[in-house]
Every structure is written in structure tokens, then in C-alpha cells.
Amino acid sequence: MSEKPSRLILGPFNRVEGDLEVRLDIAGDHVEGARVTSPLYRGFEAMLVGRPAADALTYAPRICGICSVSQSVAAARALAGVRPAGLERRLPPANGQHAINLVHAVENIADHITHFYLFFMPDFARATYAGEPWHEAAAGRFTALKGSAATQILPARAGLMNMMGVLAGKWPHTLSIQPGGSTRAITRAEQARLRLMLAGFRSFCENTLFAAPLEAVAAISSREALYDWAQGRGGDFAHFLKIAQRLDLARSGVTRLRHIAFGAYAGGDGPLFPRGMFDAGIGAAGPLPIGAITEDVSHAWYAGEGGAPRHAAPTPDMSNPDAYSWCKAPRLGGNVAEVGALSRQLVAGHPLLRDYVARDGASVEARVVARVIEVALVVMAMEHWIAAIDPAAPFQDTRPRLDTGDAMGLTEAARGSLGHWLRLDGGRISHYQIIAPTTWNFSPRDAQGVPGPLEQALVGAPIRAGETEPVSVQHIVRSFDPCMVCTVH
């Protein structure tokens, strides 16, 4: 390989929702710099302006077919947040919140296992790894569509998604999620069916994914303890860990940034996973200053200077000579921030993920481990939410709501923090802005020239001899699980 810097342009990436282009500057055998481009414009916010308020519940979820429930939750919370100054937000009845949490959890867990089995693991079956001692077993298990795992994961995922039919009528784009709760009341017989459906998915997790009880997996508190747990164990999670150790993925795709979470799965005693900020540089968590969130458009195809999503609404402008993406650059107090399952668990204080980041920073391995650990944590929480439903109690507060004012709706999609900011005037939408998880992680450079999380994570990625699609780059990009249709305006 030449010692002179050269350039690779990768994209579109297969197994990714929507188009993505990554431009790599290569020096010798590694990536020296990266620029990430979202090449398509979405424009959903522009469609919403001028429409009746309730249209947000119909239009916004159609941004994406993978995380439509997350978009519904954010839109419903934004509409519910329009209220007089000083008045507390009206929370949905407990039944409504349990039902919304369950619908949201089904979507997020389905996303996690889809990412693990169908997006991430097939890269270990690539021919570039043919000389590795673990390759034959990995190819037999995880080759896309043909591996033995496909015959188990697809029925398990379908069984989990059947819960969506009971809870929300359909998926994607359910209308059961409303500002006052859920329109879909659950009968006692349906409650029993939900228990059975979830028990079937727990069985898949404990027999195939973990080869261990969920409680035992969730309780692992350090990386060394996780490696010890995986030794001699079957199950696909242990299979991943053994390959990850051989490839040193705990030191691949590393960032040392702020991590943020908007809070996930609301409850009377607070969310299951709290809102907050974790600073990987100092290893401490604290409150999240929502008002410090801004969007920089210095390197995106928009006019103007960006600003706070509550007020700013940049318009498309292809004439910006510094631009290379339709993705804006969200910043927290001017600083780059990473989002995702790893960020949620760092904010929540899970000792295993904090140990990972304390040792080597946020990495490919840490991001994947966080997603898989979260499957165990959320399935156990879902069992409690099903048990807590009282079929005789209301599921929705249908009292009228204000039709003028500003509000925001914040939640966590599987990929990370999702926010909707809106303004209503006389019942019509006069302003709407969305910042999706991939907007944070795949942001271009800002006005100070600081790259976004993925652009930073790609620096130093090794290039194997003769590679034109470096597998290390594929691992790093997929560890963030991009969703490009959600990313742009």
C-alpha cells in the first residue's frame, strides 16, 4: 500500500436504512480523516408547518418505518407539553403509560436484535476474515440470510412484534399513541396473551442469545467479569465477545465525548433510564441542560446560522461552498455529544458499560454490548409493565388541550436521543424541528471545524492490504447503527 495519503469513498452502505456516504483520507495502513455525508433531503418539518396540530401524529412517524413508535412518542409528548406557563405537564393515566412503554419497548428491542443479528454480525462472515480461526463458525452462523441464526432470529422477532398487534393495532405508524395516553385499552384476556408472547421472547433470549438467565446477564458489572462469563459458554452474545476480543474491538472506533440521554420509558417514579449527561473525559454523570442544545449548519446545505431547535428553522441552500451533508451538526453547549444505548447506560450508571468506557473509551465493542445488555434490562421491565396494567382503569386522558404555545417532546429511540420541538398558533403548527439520533452521531464538522462522533471514531481505523471497503470501517459505522432517513431535516 502506498505511503502517500489516498482517498476512499464508501457508500451507499448495505444493510443500512437509507443512503450514507463516507469519504476517507488514507495514510499508509489507516484512516487519517473522515467526512460523513447524508446525501438525501427529507423535509418532513416543512410539510408540517401550517397543518392542524394532530397531523403531527400522522406525518412525523412516517419519517421512518423502523423507529415510527419513537417518532410517535416524541410527537405526542410535544403536543401534550403545550400548556400555560407554570402549569405542570398532564401525565397520561398509568395504564396509558404502561401501554406506550410496552409498544415503544417492542420496537426498540426488535431494533436491537435486528441490528445484532442482521446488520452487525454478518460482517464477521466476510471473505477478508477467511484466514481467522473463528471464521468458519461465524460464517456458518451469521452469513446474511443463509446462516443458521436467521432461522431462529426471524421467528423470534416476529413473535415479539405480534405484541404490537395487541397493543397498537399495527406497526409501523400506529395511531394508538396520543398526547393523553393510549387509545387501545387492554382486556384481561389480552393481558394474559401479552405475558405468553413476552415469555416466548424471553425463552429465545435465554436459550439462543445469552444461554443464561436475563437476570444473570444484567448483573454483570465489569468487562473482565463479562469475558470470564463468556468463556466456555454457548449463545450468540458469547460468540460475539470471543470474536471481539480476537479483533480488539474494545479499542476500535473509540471516542471520548459527552454522552447524552433524554430519558426512556416514563413511570410514576421516573423513567426506567433517566435523562442526563455523562462526560467520558471525567467519568461522571450530571443533569442535561436541554436549553444548551443548538444546531450548527456551517457544513450542511442550509442557509443561515442554525441555532436552538425551538426557534431556528434553516432552509435548504445548495450554494454553501463548505457544505458536504444534509445532516446538521447538533451541539450541546457548543460541544460534540454521542447518543445511543451506550450513552443511555452510561447516564443510568450501569457498572459494566462505565467500566468499558473508563478503560478504553466508547468503542465498537462497548456500543454493541450496551445494545445487547439493554435487551435483557428492557424485557424484564416489560414483564412488570404488563403485570401493572389494570384493565378496568382508563388508558387515556381525553380532556381538551391548549392550541397555542411552544413545547418539546423528548424520548429515546433504539439508536439514541430523539427530540421534537414545535409551536402551535390557534391549533395549527407554525414551527416544527426534529433532531434524530443519527443527526447527533453522524453530524458533519461545525463552525470550529470539530468533526462529529462518527468522523472522530473513524480516525485511526486500520486498512487491511488490498481492501477497498475496509471491514474495520464497516464495524465502526455499524456500531452506531445509522438510520439516514431520520437524520436530515
Image (cartoon, rainbow, N blue to C red):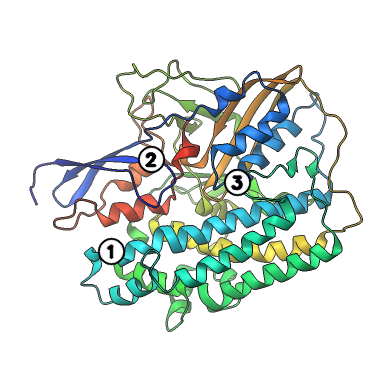
**Which residue sits at x=32%, y=65%?**
124
Which three-letter amino acid code belongs to the residue tagged 1? Arg
Q: Secondary structure at mark 3?
A: strand
User: In terms of sequence position, does the residue under pointer 1 or pointer 2 come before the other?
Assistant: 2
**Which residue sits at x=38%, y=35%?**
38
From this view, report whether residue 351 is shown above or below residue 409.
below
**Which residue sits at x=59%, y=69%?**
218
Question: Quick one: label 1, few (<14), some, or many (20+) residues within 10 Å?
Answer: some
From this view, report whether residue 277 is shown above or below residue 479.
above
Q: Foreground: 269 or 172?
A: 172
Q: Which residue is farthest bottom?
A: 232
User: In terms of sequence position, does the residue under pointer 2 or pointer 3 come before the other?
Assistant: 2
Residue with the mark numbered 3: 412
Residue with the mark numbered 1: 126
Q: Is residue 286 visible?
A: no
Image check: 396 left or right of 243? Answer: right
Residue 39 x %, y %: 36, 33
Image check: 167 left or right of 106? Answer: right
